[in-house]
Image (cartoon, rainbow, N blue to C red):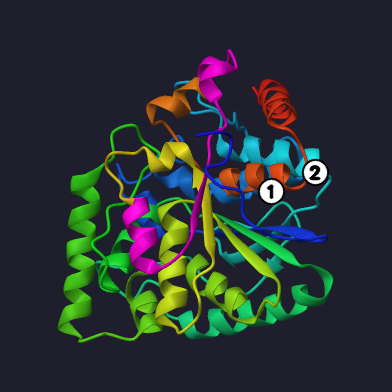
């Protein structure tokens, strides 16, 4: 394929890139998430990534935006794209453990709990309402909303939600070796609670086993009057599935070819079952001469914080494949 698997037929003049930030305590379970140097420090990742995207650097904490193997964080890719496009990203605090270091729209959510033992998002209904308010606010000022997310551990909550909604889901991972046994064990226990309590409604499923990002995104989808692109892989497919279960038309999803090519995930199948169009960006990281970015091609990281959607947006705004790759390489080198 070329840079884009297919070009979305969208006309817009006032795009907004929105990143929803949240924590789930599942990211602190050893082996679940690679979005941080230790399980506990994954709780810092959303605010550090937002700081990098907003300012081009992280000064609030000692932080090197690479994995231990030298693979750049996807937030550096998103930073490259918003700077290339001249956009000021909007961040939403859906439920964070730590105070954000950049301005955020606060919906007053709480950190997502461990769904094996208790309700994960007790205020799911209220978060949908707050998301609706934000969608209404943005509608007069924009005509394309690209929604990304940063929720370490979110592919595991996505697995739980997709399975609970009736999809035979297999989700991706930031690890090269997807920790499938850990995720399946968590999912089995979370679904056991759902079955025992005979939970069936979409928002109660989110309440039991989702994360705070999901209901906020669903509320925005419900009220926003322009076009929406969900920027992410299996996490955003869970949002699309939630929107469908709530009676809405699921928005299109855009992610990277690295997620599509993950043999442990079934994103094409899920998109087809949900009825969401899905687009893939192939940034050609293996040809840039950067060893860390080349690791995306072998399945490390793959996607994150709306990186695929941000690249798609830059392309739709008229930036060439070459200029997109050049800006990514420049920002990644500056952040290293």
Q: Position of residue 285 (x, y in %)?
A: 55, 24
Give the image quarter of residue 320.
Answer: top right
Residue 34 relative to residue 53: left or right: left
In magenta stretch: residue 282: yes
Q: Taking 209 as reference, is 199 above or below it?
A: below
Residue at image point 72% right, 40% down: 81
Q: Position of residue 268 (x, y in %)?
A: 36, 52
Q: How many marks?
A: 2
Count residues near mark 1 (Cα–Cα under 10 Å), then give few for <14, some for 14-19, many for 20+: many
Magenta residue span = 267-292
329 or 95: nearer the eye? 329
Residue at image point 45% right, 23% down: 295
Count residues near mark 2 (Cα–Cα under 10 Å), then give few for <14, some for 14-19, many for 20+: some
SS for dot 1:
helix
Q: Position of residue 32 (x, y in %)?
A: 32, 46
Residue 333 numbered tag: none
56 or 202: nearer the eye? 202
222 or 274: nearer the eye? 274
Q: Taking 176 as reference, is 181 above or below it?
A: below
Say which residue label 1 marks. 313
Q: Position of residue 314 (x, y in %)?
A: 72, 43
Residue 127 relative to residue 204: left or right: right
> Residues under labels 1 and 2: Cα distance?
8 Å
The reply to whether dot 1 and dot 2 touch (C-beta < 8 Å) is: yes
In magenta stretch: residue 135: no
Say which residue label 2 marks. 85
Give the image quarter of residue 195.
Answer: bottom left
* Residue 108 appears in the rendering: no
Earlier residue among tags 1 and 2: 2
Residue at the extreme top: 289
SS for dot 2:
helix
Residue at image point 49% right, 71% down: 250
């Amino acid at each position: 394929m070329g840079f884009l698997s297919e070009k979305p037929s969208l006309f817009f003049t006032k795009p907004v890139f929105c990143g929803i930030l949240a924590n789930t305590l599942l990211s602190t379970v050893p082996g679940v998430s690679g979005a941080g140097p230790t399980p506990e420090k994954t709780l810092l990742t959303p605010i550090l990534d937002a700081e990098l995207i907003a300012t081009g650097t992280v000064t609030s904490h000692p932080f090197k935006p690479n994995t231990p193997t030298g693979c750049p964080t996807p937030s550096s890719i998103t930073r490259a794209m918003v700077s290339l496009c001249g956009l000021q990203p909007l961040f939403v605090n859906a439920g964070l453990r730590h105070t954000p270091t950049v301005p955020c729209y606060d919906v007053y959510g709480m950190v997502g709990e461990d769904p094996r033992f208790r309700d994960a998002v007790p205020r799911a209904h209220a978060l949908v309402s707050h998301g609706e308010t934000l969608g209404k606010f943005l509608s007069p000022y924009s005509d394309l909303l690209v929604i990304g997310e940063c929720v370490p551990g979110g592919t595991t909550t996505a697995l739980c939600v997709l399975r609970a909604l009736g999809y035979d889901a297999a989700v991706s991972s930031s690890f090269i070796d997807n920790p499938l046994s850990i995720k399946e064990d968590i999912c089995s226990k979370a679904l056991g609670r759902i079955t025992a309590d005979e939970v069936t409604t979409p928002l109660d499923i989110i309440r039991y086993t989702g994360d705070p990002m999901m209901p906020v995104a669903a509320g925005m989808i419900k009220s926003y009057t322009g076009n929406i692109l969900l920027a992410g892989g299996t996490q955003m497919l869970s949002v699309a599935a939630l929107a469908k279960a709530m009676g809405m038309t699921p928005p299109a999803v855009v992610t990277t070819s690295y997620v599509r090519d993950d043999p442990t995930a079934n994103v094409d199948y899920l998109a087809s079952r949900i009825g969401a169009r899905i687009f893939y960006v192939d940034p050609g990281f293996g040809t840039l001469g950067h060893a860390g970015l080349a690791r995306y091609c072998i399945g490390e990281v793959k996607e994150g914080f709306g990186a695929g959607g941000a690249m798609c947006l830059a392309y739709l705004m008229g930036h060439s494949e070459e200029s997109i790759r050049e800006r990514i390489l420049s920002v990644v080198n500056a952040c290293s």
